[in-house]
Amino acid sequence: MSTVQRQFPKPAELLELMQFKKPELNARRRRLGKALTIDDLRTIAKRRTPKAAFDYTDGAAEGELSLHRARQAFKDIEFHPGILSPAPSVDTSCEILGAPSALPFGIAPTGFTRLMQTEGEVAGASAAGAAGIPFTLSTLGTTSIEDVRSANPGGRNWFQLYVMREREISYDLARRAAGAGFDTLMFTVDTPIAGARLRDKRNGFSIPPQLTLGTVVNAIPRPWWWIDFLTTPTLEFASLSSTGGTVGELLNAAMDPTISFADLDVIRELWPGRILVKGVQTVQDSVRLRDVGVDGIVLSNHGGRQLDRAPIPFHLLPKVRAAVGDGFTVMVDTGIMNGADIVASVALGADFTLIGRAYLYGLMAGGRAGVDKTIEILRTEIERTMALLGVSSLAELGPHHVTQLTRLVPLGDSSARASADD
C-alpha cells in the first residue's frame, strides 16, 4: 500500500513551481540567445549565409586535413584540476605586447570580411573594443584602416601586412596604419602563393560575387543577405585597387613568392611599433626570429588554408616555448573553437591566442551582436575552465594542468620507441 499522501494541487503553489519565460520578440536576439557554443553559432551562420560565402569562411585548403587536425588536437587533451584550491574569482586579463587585454585572445585578421556579413570589420573592431581585446585588420580586409580606427577609437588595433609584388603598396599601408594609431604590425609569411581552396573553386566563389543559376537558387531562402549586400556601400579593400576573379587568383596576382628576411628588415625600419611574425611553423624559425629581434611570433598554419598537412600549431607550442624561453612573446591560432582551447594554449606556453572563424561565425549569425556573443561564449568557457582547474589567474596555469593525448605520432619516434622496448 502506498504511503504517499495525495492532495489536489493549490494554484498558488503551482505558480511558484512554473515560471513562464517571457517571449523574445527580436529575431536576432532570439536566435543568438539559443547559441551556447561556437558550434551553435556556426550552425546559425550556415543557415543564414549563402553557400559560397559560408564555405569561403568555413573551408580550408585541399583535403582540409590541417584544419581538422588542428581542431582535433584541442579535443585530444586531458585537464588536470587541482583539488582544495579555491578560485572564488577568476581574473582572465593579461598584458600582451606592452598593453592590457581583458581576455587572453584577440580577433585575428580575416580577408573579404564584409562578404560574410555587411557589418564586417566594423562589427569586429567595435566588439573587440567593448570587450577590451585587440582587433586585427587584414591587408585584404573590406574596411579601410581609418574606418576601423573610427569604429574602435579607444581600443587596440593591430594591422596584418602581406608583402605585395608592388612593395610600395605594402609600405604605404604600414604608414597609414601607423598614422592611424595601430600599435602592432602582424607580418604574415605563410602566403607566398594562394593555397588550393577547393570549396571556393567548386562554388565559383569570386570577388565580386558572380551570379549563376546555382547562386540564385541558393539565395532564395536567404534574401536578407542579398538585401544587405546590395543596399550597403560597395566593398572597399585595404590593398586591392581592382578585383575580378577567384580569391586564389587575386592572391596570386598580388603576393610575391620571393619574400625573404630582407623584406622583414625593411618593414622593421618602417614600422614604429611592435612587430609580430605570423605563420611560423617550425622550432628553428621561431628561434631565428627571436634572435633577429622581432617582438613575437604567431604559430599558425593560416587556419589550414595554405599548405594542407602543415604542422599543428597547438602541438608545436610546447617545443617552441622550450626553445625560445620565457621572455619572448608566442601566440597561437588555428582550430580554436572553445574557451578551453585557449586555456590549454596558455597552460602550455602561449602568451596569447587569436580567433578567426569563431569570430566570423558570430558575425554571420548576427552582425555586431553575433561577435559580442562569440566573445561572451569564449569568456564564459575560459572562466569556467579556470575555476574548475582551481586557478584564479592566467599566470597560475602551467603544463601540469594539461596533457596532450597522442593521436598522430611521427613514424620515426614510434620506431625509436619500439627499438628501445625490444
Image (cartoon, rainbow, N blue to C red):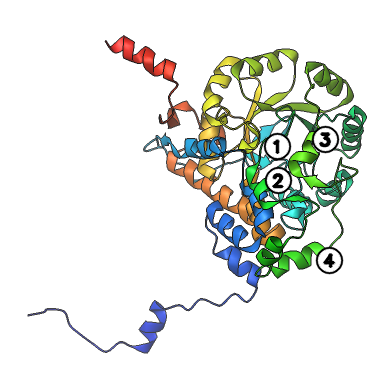
Q: Which residue is mark 3?
A: 253
Task: Using the image as rendered, state which of residue 302 and residue 99 is in the foreground.
Answer: 302
Q: Give the image quarter of residue 304.
A: top right
| Residue 248 location (% of width, % of height) | 74, 40
Residue matched to label 4: 231
Q: Nearer the viewer, residue 393 or 121?
A: 121
In front: mark 2 or mark 4? 4
Q: Amino acid at mark 2?
A: Gly
Q: Nearer the viewer, mark 4 or mark 1?
A: 4
Q: Measured along the vertical axis of the image, is residue 223 above or below residue 279?
A: below
Which one is earlier in the sequence, the residue at label 4 or at label 1?
1
Proximity of marks 2 and 4: CB atoms separated by less than 8 Å: no
Q: Could you tell me which quadrant the N terminus lies in?
A: bottom left
Q: Residue type at mark 1? A: Pro
Can I make out residue 27 in this image? yes
Spatial CA span between label 2 and label 4: 31 Å
Give yes or no for contact between labels 1 and 2 (Cβ–Cβ under 8 Å).
Answer: yes
Judged left or right of residue 336, residue 276 is: right
Dot 4: what SS? helix
Q: Amino acid at mark 4?
A: Thr
Name the disc covering residue 132, or none: 2
Residue farthest to the front, as pictured: 213
User: In the image, residue 35 lies at what x, y percent?
Assistant: 55, 60
Give the quadrant of residue 80: top left
Query: Mark 2 to mark 3: distance in Å?
Result: 36 Å
- Element under disc 3: helix
- Whole-number angstrom distance, CA of label 4 to CA of label 3: 29 Å
